[in-house]
Amino acid sequence: MGPLAQPAGSQRTNDSTPTSRLEMTGINVAFGGVLALTDVSLTVEPGQVHGLIGPNGAGKTTLFNVACGLVRPSSGRIAWRGEEMRRLKPSKLTSLGIARTLQGVGLFPGMTVLENVMIGAHRHARAGFFSALLALPTSDKDERLLRERAMRALVELGAGEYAGRYPGSLPYPVQKRVALARALVSEPDLLLLDEPASGLSEDEMHELGDLIRSVVGRMSVLLVEHHMDLVMRVCDRITVLDSGKQIAAGTPAEVQNDPAVTEAYLGDAVDADADAAELTHAEGGRPHA
Ligand SMILES: Nc1ncnc2c1ncn2[C@@H]1O[C@H](COP(=O)(O)OP(=O)(O)O)[C@@H](O)[C@H]1O
Ligand SMILES: [Mg+2]
């Protein structure tokens, strides 16, 4: 099994749902003299969409990167499925049942769309049944199964027709759907999304919201997002950061009516107007759920 080998405790179990909880507790991160996060705690509950919002520079991406193992906190605790992750590494995410999309797209330009998605299941395939099935396709049958799974993920994302194309030749929103298919093909228990709606039109954003709601039966989602109406529509819980600190947390309705949140957004010179307007107009709850 080589690099795919995992300690027994981190292996996937079939009844993972009740414990597929990501807990980040008392997280502190400092970059040089800048305190990017101060004593922040956030728990993504199994089967829920947890939104992470806040003005520019609030620390959202930093906390997201802590959850991916890209940034190591100076103190704090991360537990996944009830187990403390002392040395969470990005290269181990897939084997832990965690998938992510980063800000931007990040597809391989020299591979077709289908091959890009196959890589999502392939490159760091998780230990256990799926690694046997997917990680090292030693037979034509394995290769075919992997291809079929990748194709299914593309079709689910409405991008099946682009399977044979190269990413560079496709419109940005399609590339983003392919990147999402690549994250979903590993059948994660936790999906981490950093600003997935950036660069999307209103309609595409709406579709993205529906898509996120449609996957929560199978996985939990941590959604870092800037577009308030999307966040209000799809999230079960929301954490609001400002200047590296949590200023509010709760249901969309609770957060929306919290004066500290409106104030933080109004204080943010760059995106304040758009965000504050969205915050005011966004409906709480999930009309399409
Ligand atoms: N690698 C880094 N080195 C130094 N400072 C950083 C780094 N990453 C983020 N920061 C700082 O940490 C703070 C939080 O940034 P970030 O997490 O990117 O905010 P957000 O995603 O909410 O816009 C900002 O003040 C930012 O300048
Ligand atoms: Mg960011």
Image: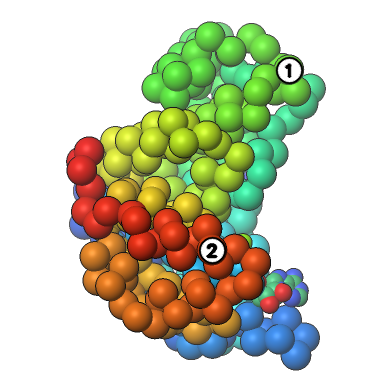
What is the crowding at mark 1: few (fewer than 14 residues within 10 Å), some, or many (at least 20)?
few
Whether tag 1 and tag 2 are in contact, CB under 8 A, the answer is no
Residue 12 visible, this orientation: no
Residue 198 visible, this orientation: yes
Q: Amino acid at mark 2?
A: Asp
Q: Amino acid at mark 1?
A: Ser
Whether 251 is drawn above or below 138: the answer is below
Residue named by callout 2: 273
Could you tell me how far apart the alpha carbons at marks 1 and 2 are, in whole angstroms?
35 Å
At x 46%, y 65%, the residue is 276
Question: Quick check: which quadrant has ligand 2?
Answer: bottom right
What is the crowding at mark 2: few (fewer than 14 residues within 10 Å), some, or many (at least 20)?
some
Q: How many marks?
A: 2
Residue 73 position by quadrant: bottom right
Task: Work out whether mark 1 precedes mark 2 in sequence or the reverse, and give the earlier one.
Answer: 1
Instruction: Out of 206 and 127, give the one closest to the viewer.
Output: 206
Residue 50 position by quadrant: bottom left
Q: Could you tell whether 12 is left or right of 143 in the image? A: left
At x 20%, y 43%, the residue is 287
Whether 172 is drawn above or below 155: the answer is below
Whether 287 is drawn above or below 41: the answer is above
* Residue 6 pos. (x, y %): 50, 53
Quadrant including the C terminus: top left
What label does residue 169 carry, if any?
1
Instruction: Out of 188 and 65, give the one closest to the viewer.
Output: 65
* Residue 268 pos. (x, y %): 58, 74
At x 36%, y 62%, the residue is 280
Instruction: Out of 272 and 110, give the one closest to the viewer.
Output: 272
* Residue 245 pos. (x, y %): 50, 84
